[in-house]
Amino acid sequence: MQTIETPGLETFTLAIVVFFIGVGLNRLIAPLGRWNIPEAVTGGLVASLATLVLFEGLGLKVVFDLDARDTLLLYFFTGIGLNAKFDDLIAGGRPLFTLLALTLAFLIIQNLIAAGGAATLGLPHGVTALLGSAALIGGHGTTIAWAPVIEQQFGLKHAMEIGIASATIGLVAASLVGGPTARFLVSRYGLKGPRDAAPILGLRDDAARDDIDHVALMRALLVLSLAILVGLAIHAALADLGLKLPPFVACLLTAIVLTNSVPRLVPGLAWPARTRSLALVSDFSLNVFLAMSLMSMQLWSVAELGPTLIVVLALQTLAAVAFAALAVFPAMGANYEAAVLTAGFVGVALGATPTAIANMTSVTKAYGSAPMAFIILPLVSAFFIDLANAAAIGFLVR
């Protein structure tokens, strides 16, 4: 087996190419666009299939340098924070806690499905967490953190491979079914979003472009970069105190504080919140991040694990879609924002927060802005739910 290592700049450039492949395929294959499949997902899946062919057919293993991906994630979530207004957060207090309660309930359901599937199919002890919230709601990062513990606790061979495969399949499923779930609800109930609202993320293809210039883009990038630097300093300080959070959470919260204080302290300051320039930078960061994530998937590790994994994860996918449509949608108000949140919830339940945001972005590009959804979902999925998931995984691996 020969390994081909792709350096950082080449990986970054290839991710942009992969995105444009997705753009072309979505235009060529009408159902992809109609089902609100993100372009980066379409292109990323094609690229990951290409690496699978190289692996299986030619014995070539392609490894990508993903350092730039982490930076793009910081820019994306900092942009979300800069668009968050305290007035919106106060207004969204009840929906935030409602969504949190629903997500916690599904975390329990997800682990019960994993336990039932493992018992029915006679899978080895310890695999439950890897077919449940550790790999799905937790994603690849949580899987990598917990797999060695599970392997040692239960003597489960290939725990890391099983967990990574589960997280990978969940990520793909979340990307493919989240948008169509929201589209069904929007069509079924005749919902509409505000077409003329200030942009948050997901610029419409037919929108005006004359308010974006080099000065506005440079201003957005400057404010984003400064907010990230402050956020990373706060993250380091909290880590020294023993409070461990993902770096993007610290940057998100820092951006929220800055966007609600600096413009008030300096009246008349040109601030990039809810401008098309900031939305453009956020769109770029998310799409390249997602393209990198999907094109770097090692699908051959999934193929080696057999059909039992597919069966359990298919049940998890059906459960996530059903819960989103039958519980999340009505509980969140059965309106357009609620429909957008169902796409995000599926992304969180099966994939990761960036997947959830990509799902919601594809919906808002088609039907209109949903600012509250983009504010409350990251706070639930990237902060509160991680704490609950850690407790749930700890219980499963006792």
Image: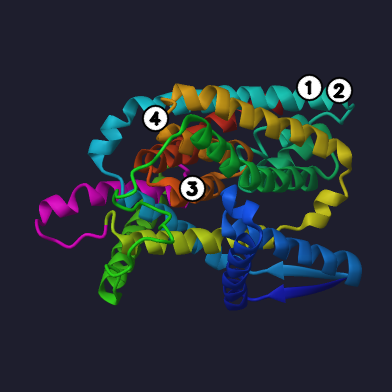
Residue 131 seen: yes
Q: As rendered, which of 261 and 318 lies closer to the eye?
A: 318
| Contact? badges 1 and 2 (CB < 8 Å) | yes
* Residue 246 tag number: 3
Mark 2 Cα-neighbour bin, 10 Å: few <14, some 14–19, many ≥20:
few
| Contact? badges 4 and 3 (CB < 8 Å) | no
Q: Which residues are magenta?
A: 243-272
* Residue 96 tag number: 4
Q: Secondary structure at mark 1?
A: helix
State whether residue 125 is above or below residue 10.
above
State whether residue 188 is above or below residue 305.
above
| Contact? badges 3 and 2 (CB < 8 Å) | no
Q: Position of residue 335 (x, y in %)?
A: 41, 30
Residue extending farthest left? 267
**Residue 234 belongs to magenta span:** no
Disc number lying in front (1 or 3) = 1
Numbered label tally: 4
Residue type at the position of mark 2:
Thr
Q: Which residue is mark 1?
A: 116
* Residue 120 tag number: 2
State whether residue 116 is above or below residue 376.
above
Cα gap from disc 1 to disc 2, whole angstroms: 6 Å
**Residue 249 belongs to magenta span:** yes
Mark 3 Cα-neighbour bin, 10 Å: few <14, some 14–19, many ≥20:
few
